[in-house]
Amino acid sequence: MKVQLLQICHARSGDKGDAANVGLIAREEKFYSLIKAKVTAAAVKKHFKGICNGKVERFELPNLWALNFLLHNTLGGGGTVSLKQDAQGKTIASALLRMEIDVPPALMKKQITKTRVVKKRK
Amino acid sequence: MKDKIRIASGQGFWGDLPSAPIDQVRLANAKSPIDYMMMDYLAEVTMSIMQKQKLRDPKAGYAKDLVEVIESILPDIVEKKIRVITNGGGVNPEACRDAIFALAKRRGIPIRVGIVLGDNILDTLDSVLAHGHELKNMETGEQLTSVRSRVLSANVYFGAMPIVEALRQGAQIVITGRTTDTGLTLAPMIYEFGWSEHDWDKLASGTVAGHILECGAQSSGGNFSADWKSVKDFANIGFPIAEAYPNGEFVITKHPKTGGMVTRQTVAEQLLYEIGDPKEYITPDCIADFTSIQLEDLGKDRVRVFGIKGRPATDSYKVSMSYNDGYSAQGTLTYTWPDAMEKAKLSDKILRSRLKKAGCTFDEMRTEFLGVDSCHGPLTEVDYGQVQEVVVKFAVRGQDKNSIIEFGKNIAPLILTGPPSVTGFAGGRPKPSDVVAYWPALLKKTAVIPRVIVEEVK
């Protein structure tokens, strides 16, 4: 089944020069190997098409059930120069949590979180 | 040697919650003691602002808020024997100390203050370059010569050791210039537990504790992305406290009956904040391996952090320089239903056409639609036809000041000369402000020597 990362992860992002960093953390240990397999640097690069103009690096922190991503050339020149509303990449974390991945239904049996995605108003 | 010390975070950046350091001290008691409070005031751009203030007034150039905080907490920190460590001295720690001495004298409270000097290499920059230190841009590899004449500030990041020296000399308040945020927390651990400056695992542990404290409430429920609705009482959010032990382990907690929360998740989020390669968290004191960190949620707002490994420090300091890189300006207008987005997009087209006609040149012009897709761009799924109102934000930067001024003159006219149902123009014409760019570099540790001065006012 398709699951939005918001359901199984939390995240925080910030700036490192013109790169944004995003720490993606599994809400439970059982989801770590899944995100490690599915949320690859290539998948993140594709997800951020039109936002990230450079390469994406990925680092693994299994103890913290977390992946760290560096999205290069993403912040319009970096914190003090950038004209972007989000010059410091603070909202890149929630942008990553929009991503959908395939999750075995058995893993999702228990409701993980009360967080709901608010449906688009028509 | 003490069997544990408790270090409170009082400020995560210049402009953080003003009541936080006051509450950390006020709420300290036998059940929830505080031995040290660290306060981080410096971001990359801060030094250039302070340098400008110092140019106008030789007695300025530090975080003035810090002196106000000290004024509020001075009797309490003396009575409760809490030592305060901060990098709020900016580019003028001496003046900051003198201001604190003046208020201590006025209040009749004797106080011993230490300052750390030597990080500011702006005045000796040419001599540093002449000695063969290139100060190439760490990110781009460019030579400094391309911006040398426009450099506004240049500071070396010192680590914990100069602060340790000030503590050894009995300083109750230690004021530094550019010190790493993590060094402010690591220093009291080295001092109290007698750690060797080559005990890399322990230094890495103190560094990780510093990383968790350095952004204030970001580790105790602030800006927390998982289940943020479960965070209680944001209004009275408690800033984090590190309870450190001689073996390097520590527990992150906060004062009882404050808002926010400390859980495995809140601590993990802060650990991931603004890091690069987690195996290589480099400070002047050590290299910490963030992949070695283990967390255990003890419940009741207590998270144990342990297992941390470190490696030897490098032979270089990081240098943070700032330089003038032209001008920028920004302005906003608000368009409403019907056709809010269509109007906003047309306004952008009109403005660009007029600026082109006026012969303006910019390095960049950027238009964003706030409330629609300014942050998540193509990832948003918004039906433009359904947008009820939108704030359009125009921004430019460039080297030609006149172009930036012309831009400022062309925002308000859109109201009477463009699409209808537009408002939200306030505060006059956008004016050019200086763009300050950042130049990170490395410098051999042998090229600069920290100086520590500890004095007492009676």
Image (cartoon, coloured by chain):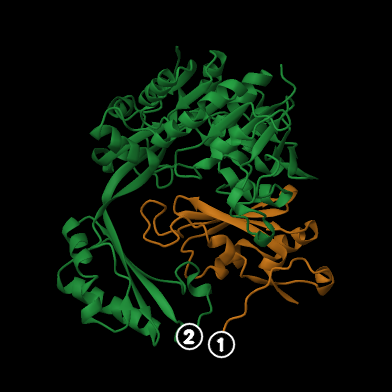
Chain colours: A orange, B green
Q: Chain of mark 2?
A: B
Q: Residues within 10 Å of mark 1 (few under 14, many from 20)?
A: few
Residue A40 location, x and y as percent?
A: 64, 63
Task: Give the alpha-carbon distance from disc 1 to disc 2, as whole Å.
Answer: 8 Å
- From what the image shows, is residue B38 above or below residue A65? above
- From what the image shows, is residue B320 above or below residue B126? below
Badge 1 vs badge 2, beta-carbon distance below 8 Å: yes
The quarter holding residue B320 reads top left
The quarter holding residue A120 reads bottom right
* Secondary element at image label 1: loop
User: Which amino acid is tagged 2?
Assistant: Gln
Residue A36 shows which numbered tag? none
Disc 2: which residue: B386
Residue B256 location, x and y as percent?
A: 71, 41
Disc 1: which residue: A122
Which residue is at a point 40% across and 85% down the rendered structure image? B337
Q: Is residue B368 left or right of residue B286?
A: left
* Secondary element at image label 2: helix
Q: Is residue A3 left or right of residue B330?
A: right
